[in-house]
Image (cartoon, rainbow, N blue to C red):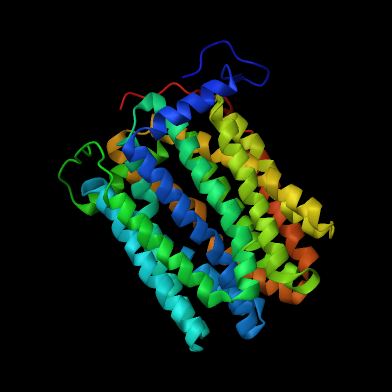
Amino acid sequence: MADGNTSHGGCQIVASHEATISAGLKLMARPNVAKMFIAYMVTYTGSAMAPIAMAFGVLDLTGSTADASIVIAAPTLASIIVLLIGGAIADRTSRHKVIYIADGLSMFAQLCLAWLFLSGHATIPLLTLFMLLNGVSIAFHMPALMGFIVQLVSAEELQSTNALLGTARNGAVAGGAALGGILVATVGAGYTLLIDALTFGLSAILIFTVKPNPQKPTPAASIIMDLKLGWREFTSHTWLWTIVLQFSLIVAATEAVFGLIGPAVARDTMDGARDWGYIASGFGIGTLLGGLVAMRIRPRFPMRLATILVFAFSGVSIALYFAAPLWIIIGSAIFSGLTGQIFAVLWYTTLQLKVPVEMLSRVSAYDHLGSVALAPLGVVVAGIVYELYGAQTTLAIAVATVVVPTACVLCVRDVRMMTTEPNNN
């Protein structure tokens, strides 16, 4: 919780780097947090490899960005359809069980995708089918995870825990993306996806052994009533629904760039999967650094700082637009990852402090649903625009889709002035 002693921009820096390390080690001494940390490291290493494998696997299969866009957009489309049910079920049953069962479902889907590529049976319809199944898993996993972290630590430790787990995730993304690019270039998409499947299995086992605090029960009601109450809570926070609306456009743009347009540009003008793996790894390195920074800051106005940082999300698109040298594109990815992770930690912590704990999964489902609502359309449109008008036009649209809504959100007073004071949960 911030006090009145803030530095320029309202951001208080925690006393020392040693204190940050000490806080992280103290959290890691707890078996629950340590297991979650390892699970994040394992599963996100595989998850960082999978998008590169799918993008280049489909581009090699058909050569068409339009075809690739259908497969890449499929999991997001499925998650949109199922998300609200996933959030409601997580709040009213067991978030713990929902998470490890969802990881098991992802393992099955990735095994099937790996087999399709390795056996030579891969087709766009079959790949799309199992990517849809992946989306169902995401729809249950993401909202459950938001509420599950609250069952592991105290309110005062939420930001440090989110940053610590973010560090695990982002370190894994950095290494996994580079490894994924190398694996796809050497052994192909099938074996890369097989490794990803195994990481989901190991993550499910680790999370199964976590022993969380009891979940606060949800009053008996129908699923429809649960969703209505979640919607009422979601819409009661202007800062929340405004930023989610902003991110419906930003996620559409970033998904299109990192999931499809970036790999297509790398295929057409660079050294293919290997170079894109380095760029994606740069983003992961940036998020790792951002997690370390996020453990040390206590902004009095978290959403003001977080929104300003979002402008940097357009960095990779700008670098690709100007056909910058590889090292500049990687540098842009590092900076985008750093700012993106600080945003994520501030966002998750604020959500966990401001929303009643018994409604966290439902509100998180509305958050995730709104944020990804336009992502499938964005990826598909980007694939078509790329084929019709080329990379520069597509990238210019992506930049504008980040910058314009972010500038608009900064005009919202509730976003600029909302403080870190927690609500009574």
Residue 105 placement (x, y as % from top left): 34, 66
Q: Quadrant where the C terminus lies?
A: top left
Q: Quick one: 399 or 245, which is closer to the camera? A: 399
Image x and y of residue 391, in percent: 77, 67
Q: Residue at x 61, y 36 (%)?
A: 307
In the image, 413 versus 273, the foreground residue is 273
Can you tell which quarter of the image residue 256 is in? Answer: bottom right
The residue depicted at 40 percent of the width and 31 percent of the height is 27
Q: Is residue 366 visible?
A: no
Residue depicted at 33% across the width and 57% down the height: 204
Q: How many marks?
A: 0
Q: Is residue 238 above or below residue 74?
A: above
Q: Residue furthest left?
A: 220
Farthest-out residue, top: 5
Q: Residue 356: percent from the left, percent from the top?
A: 32, 33
Q: Residue at x 65, y 73 (%)?
A: 185
Q: Position of residue 95 (x, y in %)?
A: 28, 48
Residue 183 seen in this snapshot: yes
Vertical order, 258 against 87 (above or below): below
Q: Nearer the viewer, residue 89 or 95?
A: 95
Side of 92 where 283 appears, left or right: right
Q: Is residue 315 left or right of residue 115?
A: right
